[in-house]
């Protein structure tokens, strides 16, 4: 009942958003930032209920940390909304135009329509996602976790109060309050009302959505990222990139999980790398060639090469040449971000052409795979599929297009 | 066994295609055209088996007509392949590039990878789809109907002979010879090997794929297209457009299925339209306001407004104004192609902005929704969803993109 009723309301509201001006959308975003500021107390009280519930259910401290809001985190959320105000409106751009016989063709960027977001116990996602959708003219149907339901209800009510003050249809941000698994399954099959579904969270959440959704979906976030150290690599650059990509932030999808080293430099390079990784307490799983050089390394299994550790662990493998590196990466990666460290132009070109990733880096860290670092200002996620969008998805990636074709009573012969 | 084995082979071959030059792909296409010409006898004999089987199974004459090949149709297939040779290669284009701090970003068009095609008893689709995929650097995994299995096997073997002569991996065109429904279901869930699935055929085939596939899918082809005749319409243009859109070819997705007439011109315009439609033997289902004017019209039901007749039938409805037309269309259409006939700029702008279709026409026929008419040269289908591509999908729409980011040992601070 709640699901279909809200779905109908949000679909209707999405047609209003098609016509909303940049000014109107920005005023609504500013109103949301102000309202969150005003409603701090309500939001923090609601969040406290979720925190207490999590303690009662003996959730881990990192789980509880992620769902906890405080004054500083509320400030971050408000800053995020204000940043979206400053971004360029991606809607209404003439992408292409041409004349053909008596017809004028125009290809124009338009909102996607209604975007469903399925996410885990991160209340900030409610605001992030809704505001990116709003700026790109999309209505946003949120389905969060039961573990943050009080926070989510408070944040969505706050946003709705702001929409109302800004004279925008309050239905264009909706929260599904029923957090049962059965209703989530129905949510994923709302093809009549949802134009796109973006799951944000763990690999298992995303897999569940891919397997069950009939609404078009964008797979995001899973990152088994590689650094290949070529025989023509500069060692200093290689070490700097690997340490940055592995250790700067370990729980993120753009962290490095696997290093491939050209066999001809293995005896030279491996000890240097191991020394640096150990300084950062990184556990190393390595192939037998590596273990022969350093018997203290753990022997890697097949699973290690496919593993997204999301922690201070890494796999290392000896590779016979750049082609072998490409084949290994295309077999084990998640099409997210992969690096070649090399000074050889042919190797660089081959790797760039044939590694089938959203982001191929040449002598740079995988940690740049991020909407902000790309200059997009913000991101809704990092796509690891090849349909619609790849890599960091900013506001432009939250649009579709339409053709407007003008004639003068023109008919097909 | 066949499914997974071929899927693995095609995935591997797709990496080779990433590096195939325009020259190589064109030579392979020319070889395919030549080989089909050489193998006419084999292909026609195989097709004869399918035709006999269809007769034995008492299939309809239109069904048998669609699956029958003859010399002229073989010529059409060959012409189609040669046309694809002449089209621009969509791969390897620099879509965008920018510098940010010490990094150089390049966004480059790349093939999607492996595209699965599920289609009905139309053997020409085997060649069409495979050649459009090949030109855009994609491997193509075909799953046709059991009713054309002999034709499809012959055509794919012919194409593989040509690929071999052109020194391209013959695995980059595969046919799934097991045409059981169970294997089709597995085919739609081959996420590890297929990057995209495009169903081509009836609405029920497409619905089946949307509901069951976990591979990303592009919905194509369903077209409940409208012509709205505004109170500021030129009647001659309106009549010409409706007759062209309804009758020029009736069994196609870009035919008009429903006409909306502004109430203020209904008494004047309806009789003119009915006279012209009757000359073309079009059965008319009309709203009660229309029936009051012409009592010989059939009274339309709710289902009529949602119906894609694909025949000499049409629905007509009186509408109170352009906003009512927009709401009606957004409720009943399939987001394919819709027309406003009007000389009023405000009405035209409102309609173009708010009608949520891939193609919005102003004073022109819906029949132009076609890759050739758009100037794309060929099309794999007409997308009616908003993700990845909308409207006619040519070679550009069969590509994805990747980012290549170059630094000099650059790490994230």
Image (tube, coloured by chain):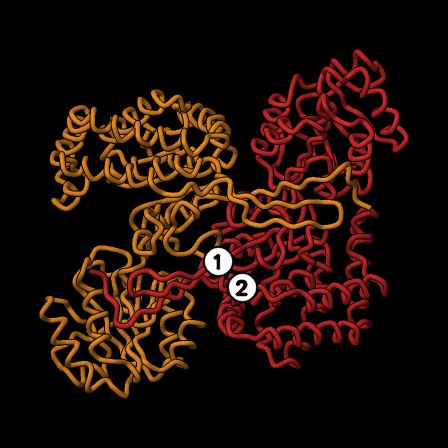
Chain colours: A red, B orange
- Residue B57's tag is none
Tag 2 or tag 1, which sits nearer the N-term? Answer: 2
Q: Is label 1 in a helix, a strand or a loop?
A: loop
Q: Residues within 10 Å of mark 1 (few under 14, many from 20)?
A: some
Q: What is the CA distance from the residue labelled 1 to the residue labelled 2?
A: 9 Å
1 vs 2, front mark: 1
Q: Can residue A1 be seen in this view?
A: no
In the image as oriented, which residue stretches furthest toward the right? A279
Compared across the picture, whether A225 is left or right of B34 comes to right
Whole-percent x, y for residue A129 in the image? 65, 60
Residue A81 figure quarter = bottom right
Image position of B362 with respect to B398: above or below:
below
Residues beneath discs 1 and 2 located on the same chain: yes
Residue found 71% across the figure and 28% down from its top: A342
Q: In the rendered view of the protein, which quadrant contains the C terminus of chain A? A: bottom left
Whole-percent x, y for residue B58 in the image? 12, 39
Q: Which residue is identified by label 2?
A: A3
Residue B367 figure quarter = bottom left
Q: How crowded is mark 2: few (under 14 residues within 10 Å), some or many (20 or more)?
A: some
Image position of B296 with respect to B256: above or below:
below
**Closer to us: A329 or B224:** A329
- Tag 1–tag 2 contact (CB < 8 Å): yes
Compared across the picture, whether B364 is left or right of B383 comes to left
- The chain identifier of the residue carrying mark 2 reads A
Q: Which residue is identified by label 1?
A: A190
Q: Across the whole image, how many numbered discs are drawn on residues?
A: 2
**Closer to us: B403 or B350:** B403
Residue found 37% across the figure and 36% down from its top: B184
Whole-percent x, y for residue B271 in the image? 15, 81
Residue found 64% across the figure and 24% down from its top: A325
């Amino acid at each position: 009942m709640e699901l279909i009723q809200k779905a109908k309301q949000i679909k209707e509201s999405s047609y209003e958003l098609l016509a909303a001006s940049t000014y109107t959308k920005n005023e609504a975003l500013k109103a949301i930032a102000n309202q969150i500021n005003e409603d701090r107390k309500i939001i923090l009280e609601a969040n406290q209920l979720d925190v207490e519930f999590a303690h009662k259910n003996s959730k881990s401290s990192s789980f509880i940390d992620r769902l906890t809001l405080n004054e500083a985190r509320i400030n971050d959320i408000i800053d995020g909304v204000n940043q979206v105000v400053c971004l360029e409106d991606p809607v209404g751009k003439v992408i292409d135009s041409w004349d053909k016989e008596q017809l004028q063709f125009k290809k124009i960027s338009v909102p996607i329509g209604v975007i469903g977001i399925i996410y885990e116990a991160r209340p900030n996602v409610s605001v992030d996602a809704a505001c990116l959708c709003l700026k790109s003219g999309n209505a946003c149907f949120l389905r969060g976790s039961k573990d943050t339901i009080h926070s989510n209800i408070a944040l969505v009510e706050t946003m709705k109060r702001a929409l109302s003050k800004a004279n925008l249809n309050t239905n264009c941000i909706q929260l599904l309050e029923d957090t049962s698994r059965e209703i989530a399954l129905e949510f994923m099959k709302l093809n009549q009302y949802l134009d796109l579904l973006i799951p944000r969270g763990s690999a298992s959440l995303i897999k569940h959505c891919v397997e069950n959704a009939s609404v078009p979906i964008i797979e995001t976030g899973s990152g088994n990222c590689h650094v290949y150290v070529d025989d023509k690599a500069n060692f200093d650059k290689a070490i700097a990139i690997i340490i940055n990509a592995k250790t700067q932030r370990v729980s993120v999808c753009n962290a490095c999980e696997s290093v491939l080293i050209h066999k001809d430099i293995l005896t030279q390079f491996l000890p240097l790398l191991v020394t640096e990784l150990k300084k950062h307490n990184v556990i190393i799983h390595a192939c037998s060639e590596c273990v022969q050089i350093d018997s203290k390394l753990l022997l890697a299994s097949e699973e290690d090469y496919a593993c997204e550790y999301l922690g201070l662990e890494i796999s290392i493998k000896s590779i016979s040449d750049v082609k072998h590196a490409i084949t290994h990466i295309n077999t084990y990666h998640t099409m997210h971000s992969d690096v070649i460290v090399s000074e050889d132009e042919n190797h660089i070109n081959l790797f760039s052409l044939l590694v089938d990733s959203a982001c191929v880096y040449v002598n740079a860290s995988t940690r740049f795979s991020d909407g902000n670092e790309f200059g997009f200002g913000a991101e809704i996620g990092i796509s690891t599929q090849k349909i619609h969008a790849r890599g960091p998805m900013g506001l432009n990636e939250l649009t579709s297009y339409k053709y407007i074709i003008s004639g003068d009573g023109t008919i097909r012969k």
